[in-house]
Amino acid sequence: MSLEVKDLSVSYGEKTVLKNISFQIEKGQIIGLVAPNGTGKTTLFNAMMRFIPTRSGQILIDGTEYTASSKDVLELHQKMTFFPDQGDLLLNFSGREHIKMYADIWADSKQEVDAIIELLEMNGYVDRKVHTYSLGMKQRLCFAMMVAANTPVMLMDEVMNGLDPENVALVSSVLLKLKSEGKIIMVSSHLLDNLDEYADKVFFLKEKILHHITDWHEQMPIYYKTLLSPEKAKELEAKVLLPEETIHLGNNMLCIPIKDLDTEAQLKLFQEIRLLEPEELSVGPMGTSEYYSYIYSLPVRVPDRREEYAVGS
């Protein structure tokens, strides 16, 4: 099983939103998709599903192209599903009825419904009407519906929206289970550090193109990552000649590459940083949140979990 997008471009009138997007994904992979709001993530998913017209480009699964013809779209939607919108849930139906509906339409696997409910720990509320659900309960239901559809390719837009930390961990574990079954999954999410826990690659959209890909199966450069005040950062630079490739992120975080430093130079640099009593200091590759800051010239995103998860589970 493979999914290929070739030279996909989308325009609204004279405005180009996506330009010549190309990638190929093999079975058993999870791809993270990140970009600031309004820069094309949902548009890309909609174009891949043939929900919207494209200016150019091809969508292929296992080498077979699926055009915008009614016949092709119907066949495409048997192989690829899109994360349901909470606004489309039927408020007077129960969660179980929604999951059964998706199982019947796509997978004809009624026997799997109870297992999905158990897997996602929904027994306590799944038989209640959806209008009684919190935002987090609705989101878990939408995810359960995707699992019930059981298509080879799954596109999940903001799958973690409204979930508390416990359910973020639960959904992440189920994503890994789906990956082990050979699914191709694309996930957009504002929880950037969480993406690094399960994504094989992370795609960054910028200026209408696929700007950067982080591939976690490749060897990544190692950095000293330290958060210093501007004054302390200047003090460090006065004491130590930092490599030219040092990255200054938007909230006074320095990512200092150490691959060209010998052991003695690495130790000296580490000691100098420690003497400045940094707010943070770690060693490792840049994660998605740091690449996000670097690519979009924004501060490293460190969300306030108390605010972020106050919407309910």
Image (tube, rainbow, N blue to C red):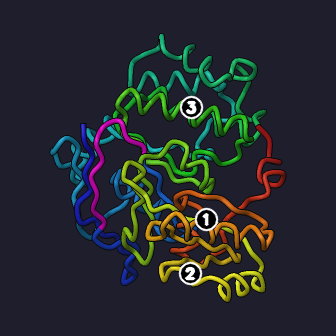
- View extreme (front): residue: 264
| 277 versus 101 height, above or below | below
Q: Quadrant of the C terminus?
A: top right
- View extreme (top): residue: 111
Q: Secondary structure at mark 2?
A: loop
Q: Amino acid at mark 3?
A: Ser
Left/right placement of residue 294 relative to residue 233 reads left
> What percent of the width, then of the height, locates residue 148?
48, 26
Q: Quadrant of the N terminus?
A: top left
Q: Nearer the viewer, residue 238 or 225?
A: 238
- The 10 Å Cα crowd at callout 1, few under 14, some 14 to 19, many 20 or more, is few
Q: Nearer the viewer, residue 110 or 298?
A: 298
Instruction: Name the main secondary structure of what is drawn in magenta.
Output: strand
**Which residue is denoted by mark 1 in the rendering?**
267
> What percent of the width, then of the height, locates residue 20?
28, 70
Front disc: 3 or 2: 2
Q: Nearer the viewer, residue 92 or 22?
A: 22
- The 10 Å Cα crowd at callout 2, few under 14, some 14 to 19, many 20 or more, is some
Q: Is residue 27 one of those drawn in magenta? A: yes
Asked whether the beta carbons under mark 2 and mark 1 sit within 8 Å of each other, the answer is no
Front disc: 3 or 1: 1
> What percent of the width, then of the height, locates residue 214?
42, 59
Front disc: 2 or 1: 1
Query: Which residues, given as a range, are shown in magenta?
Result: 21-30
- At a point 49% along the width and 46% down the height, the residue shown is 156
Lower position in the chain sequence, tag 3 or tag 2: 3
| 24 versus 113 height, above or below | below
**Which residue is denoted by mark 3 in the rendering?**
173
Residue 242's disc number: 2
Q: Secondary structure at mark 1?
A: helix
Q: Amino acid at mark 1?
A: Leu
